[in-house]
Amino acid sequence: MTDLLETLRSPVLLAATVAAGLQAGTYYVWACGVMPGLARTDDRTFTSSLNHMNVAIVNPVFMLTFLGAPALAALAIVTTSGPARTWAIAGAALAVATVIVTGVGNIPLNDALAAGGSRADFETLWVRWNVVRTLTSTAALGCLSWAALRG
């Protein structure tokens, strides 16, 4: 069993790191481009655009990395040992935190906006939650990258 785990270590850490990077990149783009761009639009365009994007993003490709990032990070814990394992644990915890932040912060706001909520009740809070998940997902990427280097 030890030989199998050792064989899987590098590919699992690579996959976990790529998935974490895709997630971090997604939230970073929302923080640096999408939301600042939408901030320059009128309320109707803002609300309509966000509602369309929030529906479109729930697709198999996104969900593969959204759920895959924490799952692969958890698998990385199993395949690592020594100092690398500590970093894999941190990366997994941060990847899970990203999903939790999304579920507790961003998704309820998305749902409220889709149900007819106002931009004023949505925008500032959503941007703050997105900054949090950008930080957690980027930190997960850093920890998993470090685990890969240490492993």
Image: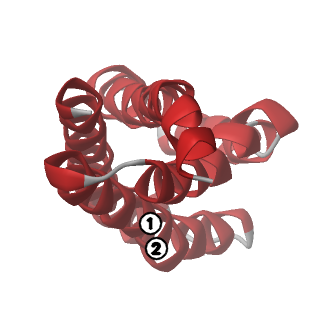
Q: State the image coordinates of residue 100 (x, y, percent, origin top left).
A: 46, 73
Q: Is residue 54 shown above or below 74?
A: above
Query: Which quadrant of the structure image shows residue 36?
Result: top left
Do the residues under discs 2 and 1 have CB atoms within 8 angstroms?
Answer: yes
Residue drawn 38% across the image and 24% down it: 29
Question: Alpha-carbon distance for marks 2 and 1?
Answer: 6 Å
SS for dot 2: helix
Figure disc tally: 2
Q: Nearer the viewer, residue 43 or 25?
A: 25
Q: Nearer the viewer, residue 22 or 148?
A: 148
Q: Amino acid at mark 2?
A: Ile
Query: Which quadrant of the structure image shows residue 134?
Result: top left
Residue drawn 60% across the image and 63% down it: 110
Q: Amino acid at mark 1?
A: Val
SS for dot 1: helix
- Residue pointed to by mark 2: 100
Number of the front mark, 2 or 1: 1
Horizontal arrangement in the rendering, residue 135 relative to residue 2 (left or right)? left
Q: Nearer the viewer, residue 15 or 106?
A: 15
Quadrant of the rendering where the N terminus is positioned: bottom right
Q: State the image coordinates of residue 31 (x, y, percent, origin top left).
A: 30, 34
Q: Is residue 35 shown above or below 129?
A: above
Horizontal arrangement in the rendering, residue 30 relative to residue 112 (left or right)? left
- Residue pointed to by mark 1: 96
Q: State the image coordinates of residue 63 (x, y, percent, origin top left).
A: 74, 45
